[in-house]
């Protein structure tokens, strides 16, 4: 399988919103890569629910509001955000463009938007950090590391040390995918990584050669052997100086546990519907989680965000900010860094427009009474 795609030199002129990039990405990418990035798990019920839930939320428009001094600025974990969204950690971006993560980061930097690098990135932690430090201006947007806990503690510590030493400002630990989801769409399409794309940050990892099929319950045996538990996360929080964000929570009880063990924030997420099919949409999970953790705890949300109005809805229902997922990848596949920068700019403009038409002058004014569930 090849990862070299026919990218557009320019942004196609008929792109008006970020999901318009989806159609181009589908044409440009090989079938297996397309199904890998676009697919959800199993019957894609959760992936679809992420959208239907957002669409069901109505905005209450307000007229003739005084918008003097309006701003999209906010604070998250002591860092300043020009707009309340960051790029989600997403694996293997070189599948989509030869510059991979570096293309996405260049766009994020140019648009003043934060970036989260996945453990499964196809570019090294150090190369991304170097580019970030070179391209940053006086008020830097966040660069965070998206950690997948490794079965071997030493490998996990090694990733944390590298991220910390390279100047990443927070650890976002993904806990909802301890095992691959049932990615039936990519299985049917025969997806496998091409030779020139790999998880370069894990190349020296200790291999697990256990044959789990020897166990009565092979899937559960694998989970027991290699998946992290609350104790693992506590150990990481104790070990690192960086703020820890736990990504992939949908249940208020889990949110409370995360808060109790000293996490600085959580990401309410179902991984874009890529892991447990049948899980609830993250926007449906959000209000109860906000209620449980109280108003001062930082909440980030992702899964299904395609529009600036979705970002607004998430904030109204209790998120402090959101992560942008697949739509950034569609833009990357279509038009490289220019495409991603364009997609981010569209989201910013749509978000501002929604604020203006709902009479919210700043992020704090995006309150629950601006939406109707
Ligand atoms: C191709 C792809 C790769 C992903 N890789 C990771 C990853 O390495 N780590 C992680 O925590 N989440 C990963 N995710 C999930 C995203 O961080 C995010 O939760 C999800 O894409 C949000 O849903 P959306 O695509 O509907 O916006 C990945 C998602 C996609 C589409």
Image (spheres, helix red, strand yellow):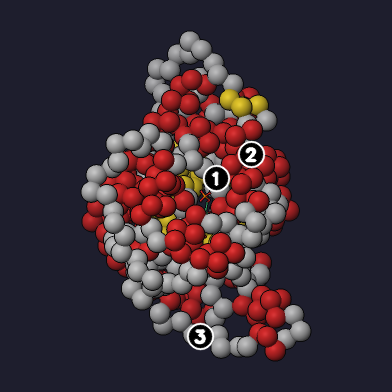
Mark sitting on residue 196: none
Q: Is residue 20 left or right of residue 40?
A: left
**Height in image: 263 above or below 293?**
below
Residue that mark 3 sits on: 207
Counting residues from the start of the chain, the first of labels 3 and 1 encountered is 3
* Left or right: 262, with 305 as reference point: right
The mark that comes first in sequence, 1 or 2, is 2
**Position of residue 301 measured from the top left corner of the image (x, y, whole percent):** 56, 46
Q: Position of residue 2 (x, y in %)?
A: 35, 69
Q: Which residue is mark 2?
A: 53
Specify the quadrant of the image occupied by residue 290.
Answer: top right
Residue in view at x 24 percent, y 52 percent = 135
Q: CA distance from mark 1 to mark 2?
A: 9 Å
Which residue is farthest top?
Answer: 64
In this view of the protein, which residue sits in the foreground, 158 or 352? 352
Disc 1 + disc 2, Cβ < 8 Å = yes
Q: Is mark 3 within 8 Å of ligand 1?
A: no
Residue appearing at x 76%, y 84% in the figure: 216
Q: Nearer the viewer, mark 3 or mark 1?
A: 1
Residue 43: give x, y in percent of width and height.
65, 56
Q: Which residue is mark 1?
A: 304
As measured in the structure, the alpha-carbon distance from the residue carrying label 3 to the one carrying label 1 is 34 Å
Dot 1: element: loop
Q: Is residue 315 visible?
A: no
């Amino acid at each position: 399988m090849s990862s070299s795609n026919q990218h557009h030199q320019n942004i196609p002129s008929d792109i008006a919103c970020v999901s318009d990039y989806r159609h181009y990405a589908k044409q440009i990418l090989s079938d297996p890569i397309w199904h890998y990035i676009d697919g959800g798990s199993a019957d894609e019920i959760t992936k679809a629910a992420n959208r239907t839930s957002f669409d069901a939320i109505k905005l209450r428009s307000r007229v003739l509001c005084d918008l003097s001094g309006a701003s999209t600025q906010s604070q998250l974990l002591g860092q300043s955000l020009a707009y309340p969204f960051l790029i989600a950690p997403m694996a293997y971006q070189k599948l989509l463009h030869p510059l991979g993560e570096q293309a996405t980061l260049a766009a994020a930097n140019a648009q003043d938007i934060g970036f989260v690098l996945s453990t499964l990135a196809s570019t090294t932690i150090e190369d991304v950090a170097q580019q970030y430090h070179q391209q940053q201006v006086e008020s830097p947007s966040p660069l965070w590391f998206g950690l997948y806990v490794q079965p071997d503690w030493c490998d996990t510590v090694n990733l944390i040390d590298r991220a910390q030493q390279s100047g990443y400002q927070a650890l976002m630990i993904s806990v909802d995918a301890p095992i691959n989801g049932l990615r039936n769409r990519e299985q049917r399409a025969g997806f496998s990584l091409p030779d020139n794309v790999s998880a370069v940050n894990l190349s020296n990892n200790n291999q697990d050669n256990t044959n789990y099929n020897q166990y009565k319950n092979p899937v559960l045996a694998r989970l027991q052997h290699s998946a992290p538990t609350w104790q693992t996360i506590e150990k990481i929080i104790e070990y690192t100086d960086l703020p820890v964000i736990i990504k992939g929570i949908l249940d208020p009880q889990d949110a409370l546990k995360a808060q109790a063990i000293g996490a600085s924030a959580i990401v309410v997420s179902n991984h874009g519907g890529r892991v447990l099919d049948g899980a609830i949409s993250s926007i449906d999970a959000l209000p109860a989680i906000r209620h449980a953790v109280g108003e001062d705890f930082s909440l980030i949300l992702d899964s299904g965000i395609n529009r600036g109005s979705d970002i607004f809805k998430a904030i109204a229902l209790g998120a402090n900010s959101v992560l942008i997922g697949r739509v950034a990848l569609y833009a990357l596949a279509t038009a490289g860094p220019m495409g991603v920068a364009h997609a981010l700019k569209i989201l910013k403009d749509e978000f501002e427009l929604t604020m203006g038409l709902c009479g919210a002058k700043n992020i704090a004014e995006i309150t629950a009474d601006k939406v109707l569930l």
